[in-house]
């Protein structure tokens, strides 16, 4: 996964109710951390930006990934749209250009 980026476009993983989406994503991130099989970056846009903000159930896992060198990029347009710009707790606030750059440099892009 070294040259892979993940795209998180929803508030969790999959299309179930929010509690299950958060539970699934938490387990996915925990396993990624345990196996030390880390992507180069995780990009958050649309409702995915909620995952890097205050109140997110995966903030701890995302912080751990960030300290291990995974670049976390949250879309500034989306944060502004949801009025969350001041609630970001992990990662960097970037533009669509930053997300596009990460995608272009990646050998593989996975959307969760």
Image (tube, grey):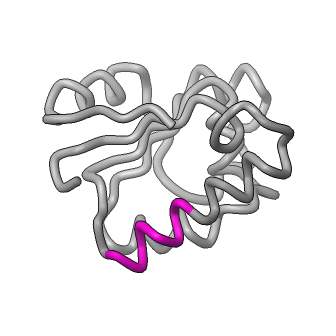
Q: Is residue 66 left or right of residue 53?
A: left
| Residue 2 figure quarter | bottom left
Q: Is residue 36 left or right of residue 108?
A: right
Residue 29 horizontal side relative to residue 72, left or right: right
Q: Quadrant of residue 38?
A: bottom left
Report the front residue among 49 and 108.
108
- Please identify the dominant SS of the magenta region: helix
| Residue at image location 36% in from the left, 28% down from the top | 99
Residue 82: x, y in percent? 77, 26
Residue 34, magenta (yes or no) = yes
Q: Residue at x 41, y 45 (%)?
A: 42
User: Relative to residue 77, is residue 90 depicted above or below?
Assistant: below
Q: Is residue 89 above or below residue 100?
A: below
Q: Position of residue 70 (x, y in %)?
A: 33, 59
Task: Please tell me how many numbered marks the rendered image carries.
Answer: 0
Identify the residue at horizontal 56%, vertical 58% (top origin). 90
Residue 68 occupies quadrant: bottom left
Please state the horizontal and vertical placement of residue 12, each as a whole percent of the image.
68, 44
For residue 23, side relative to residue 61 (left or right): right
| Residue 95 x, y percent position in the rendering | 43, 25
Q: Residue at x 63, y 24 (%)?
A: 46
The image shows residue 56, relative to residue 6, as above or below, that is below
Q: Please identify the residue farthest to the bottom as the structure is shown.
A: 34
Q: Identify which residue, 52 or 108, lies in the foreground.
A: 108
Q: Is residue 88 magenta?
A: no
**Span of residues in magenta:** 28-35
Closest to the observer, 32 or 88: 32
């Amino acid at each position: 996964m070294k040259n892979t980026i993940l795209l998180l476009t929803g508030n969790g993983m999959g299309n179930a109710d929010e509690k299950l989406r958060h539970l699934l994503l938490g387990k996915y991130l925990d396993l990624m951390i345990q196996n030390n099989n880390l992507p180069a970056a995780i990009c958050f846009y649309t409702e995915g930006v909620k995952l890097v903000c205050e109140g997110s159930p995966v903030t701890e896992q995302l912080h751990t990934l960030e300290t291990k060198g995974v670049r976390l990029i949250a879309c500034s347009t989306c944060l502004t749209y949801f009025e969350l710009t001041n609630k970001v707790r992990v990662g960097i606030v970037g533009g669509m250009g930053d997300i596009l750059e990460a995608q272009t440099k990646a050998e593989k892009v996975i959307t969760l």
